[in-house]
Image (tube, helix red, strand yellow):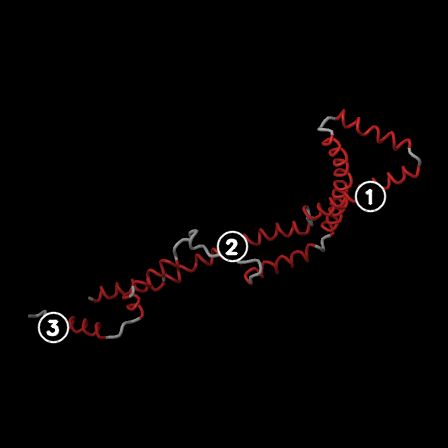
């Protein structure tokens, strides 16, 4: 009979606890979907839940293009890179002109007669010799007209391949190359910052669970 008051007090505490409004921690305990949500938030990324990459014109890439333009503006002030830029332009134009007006017209002038001669050099030379003899034996006016026609054909073929070459192989500026190297390092630093921020988020998500565990221990100790 000495333990009757203790049991009565315990029953009253349980009744008060059942009729009293639930605290936010107890509400989270009664709702198991909150734990499932927190677990889903901290789950590792898989190919199914990886967020989509931002589009080129989206606002998320604005810092990228701002940093790139600022770096290009600073790089153009370097004298060494400016000298490399002009030398790269001259070398680029020289290569394009040699390819367009030197290699391709000569290749066409040799390839077409070789194809017409069924890839037989002897037949090709025998077909060309009469034309060469007629050109040498002709008067200066006919020779001038023939040379003018060949010059127009050579220039037309050269300009055609020059435009085609400009489209296929555009000029690669040293400034753009330096900017690409810098922006790769910038992207790596940006991704590391995002990874650190993502690693810090689970600590804030799991904070209610820690408080819930502490409350459970306190109630168990009280009982």
First reached walking from the N terminus: tag 1 or tag 3: 3
Please say if 43 is above or below 9.
above
Residue at mark 1 to residue at mark 3: CA–CA distance: 119 Å
Crowding at dot 3, Cα within 10 Å, few <14 / some 14-19 / many 20+, comes out as few
Crowding at dot 2, Cα within 10 Å, few <14 / some 14-19 / many 20+, comes out as few
Q: Which label belongs to residue 152? A: 1
Dot 3: element: helix
| Residue 106 placement, left or right of 133 | left
Give the residue number, with chain letter if any, for mark 3. Answer: 5
Q: Residue furthest top?
A: 122
Residue at mark 2 to residue at mark 1: CA–CA distance: 57 Å
Residue drawn at 29 percent across, 65 percent down: 31
Dot 2: element: helix
Q: Residues at badges 2 and 3 in contact (C-beta under 8 Å)?
A: no
Q: Which label belongs to residue 191? A: 2
Residue 3 figure quarter: bottom left
Give the x, y percent position of residue 122.
Answer: 76, 24
First reached walking from the N terminus: tag 2 or tag 1: 1
| Residue 95 placement, left or right of 57 | right
Viewer-nearest residue: 172 or 16 = 172
Please say if 27 is above or below 172.
below
Give the x, y percent position of residue 170.
Answer: 69, 48
């Amino acid at each position: 009979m000495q333990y009757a008051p203790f049991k009565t007090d315990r029953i009253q505490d349980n009744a008060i606890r059942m009729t009293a409004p639930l605290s936010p921690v107890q509400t989270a305990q009664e709702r198991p979907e909150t734990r499932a949500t927190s677990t889903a938030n901290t789950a590792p990324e898989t190919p199914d839940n990886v967020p989509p990459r931002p589009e080129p014109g989206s606002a998320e890439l604005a810092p990228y293009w701002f940093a790139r333009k600022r770096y290009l503006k600073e790089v153009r002030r370097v004298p060494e890179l400016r000298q490399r830029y002009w030398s790269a332009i001259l070398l680029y134009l020289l290569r394009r002109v040699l390819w367009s007006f030197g290699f391709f017209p000569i290749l066409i002038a040799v390839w077409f007669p070789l194809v017409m001669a069924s890839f037989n050099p002897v037949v090709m030379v025998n077909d060309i010799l009469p034309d060469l003899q007629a050109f040498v034996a002709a008067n200066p006016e006919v020779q001038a007209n023939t040379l003018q026609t060949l010059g127009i054909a050579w220039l037309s073929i050269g300009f055609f391949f020059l435009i085609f070459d400009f489209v296929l192989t555009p000029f690669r500026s040293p400034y753009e190359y330096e900017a690409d190297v810098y922006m790769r390092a910038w992207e790596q630093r940006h991704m590391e910052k995002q990874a650190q921020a993502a690693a810090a988020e689970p600590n804030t998500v799991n904070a209610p669970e820690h408080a819930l565990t502490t409350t459970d221990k306190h109630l168990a100790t009280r009982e």
